[in-house]
Image (cartoon, helix red, strand yellow):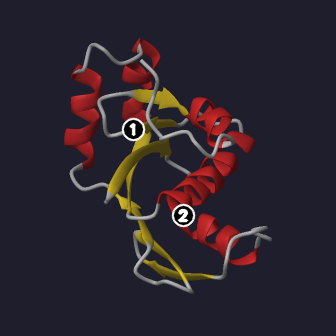
């Protein structure tokens, strides 16, 4: 089953930096990964089973997505105000464990730089990066924002 998440990140977030982290960090307990970086997309696969993947790339129609977030009155007012200063990335995956690890590394990188980021859980909820980081430590968490 394919999962989708949306990362709303600062404009200086770099997929190439994340790619380097994935290549060179000690990923304790995770099998070797196959990593490909193309212009605006990072593709990560398990080496042992390349059918399991995370495709992480720039979302299409950036301005339309930003406007849709700004118009959604259920979203946090601060988020709605700041989303125009962000870049939209889409993560598609058929492997929740791999998706969790790639998302965790991306969010750690952003939060370490003290920058704002949000994640859309693809179920109509947007939460700060810190919310996701706190919950990713629970292996049973389903990557959905609690209502």
Please identify the quarter of the rendering in which residue 53 is found. bottom left
Question: Looking at the picture, how far across and down is residue 103, in whole percent?
Answer: 55, 53
Residue found 39% across the figure and 20% down from its top: 81
Badge 2: residue crowd in 10 Å (few <14, some 14–19, many ≥20): some
Please identify the quarter of the rendering in which residue 83 is found. top left
Q: Which quadrant of the rendered structure holds the N terminus?
A: bottom left
Question: How far apart are the alpha carbons under marks 2 and 1?
Answer: 16 Å
Residue found 49% across the figure and 44% down from its top: 9
Residue ID for mark 1: 121
What SS does tag 2 mark?
A: helix
Residue found 65% across the figure and 40% down from its top: 138
Considering only order in the chain, which callout, 1 or 2, is on the residue closer to the N terminus?
A: 2
Left or right, residue 70 beside residue 17: left
Residue ID for mark 2: 98
Left or right, residue 141 beside residue 21: left
Q: Which quadrant of the rendered structure holds the C terminus?
A: top left
Question: Looking at the picture, how far across and down is residue 61, in whole percent?
Answer: 21, 51
Question: Looking at the picture, how far across and down is residue 136, in whole percent?
Answer: 62, 42
């Amino acid at each position: 089953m394919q999962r989708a998440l949306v990362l709303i990140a600062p404009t200086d977030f770099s997929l190439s930096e994340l790619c380097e982290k994935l290549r060179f960090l000690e990923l304790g307990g995770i099998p070797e990964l196959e990593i490909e970086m193309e212009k605006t997309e990072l593709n990560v696969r398990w080496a042992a089973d390349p059918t399991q993947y995370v495709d992480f790339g720039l979302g299409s129609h950036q301005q339309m997505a930003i406007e849709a977030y700004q118009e959604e009155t259920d979203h946090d007012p601060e988020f709605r105000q700041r989303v125009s200063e962000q870049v939209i990335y889409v993560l598609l995956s058929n492997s929740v464990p791999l998706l969790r690890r790639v998302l965790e590394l991306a969010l750690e990188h952003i939060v370490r730089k003290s920058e704002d980021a949000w994640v859309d859980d693809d179920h109509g909820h947007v939460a700060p990066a810190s919310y996701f980081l706190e919950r990713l430590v629970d292996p049973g968490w389903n990557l959905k924002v609690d209502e």
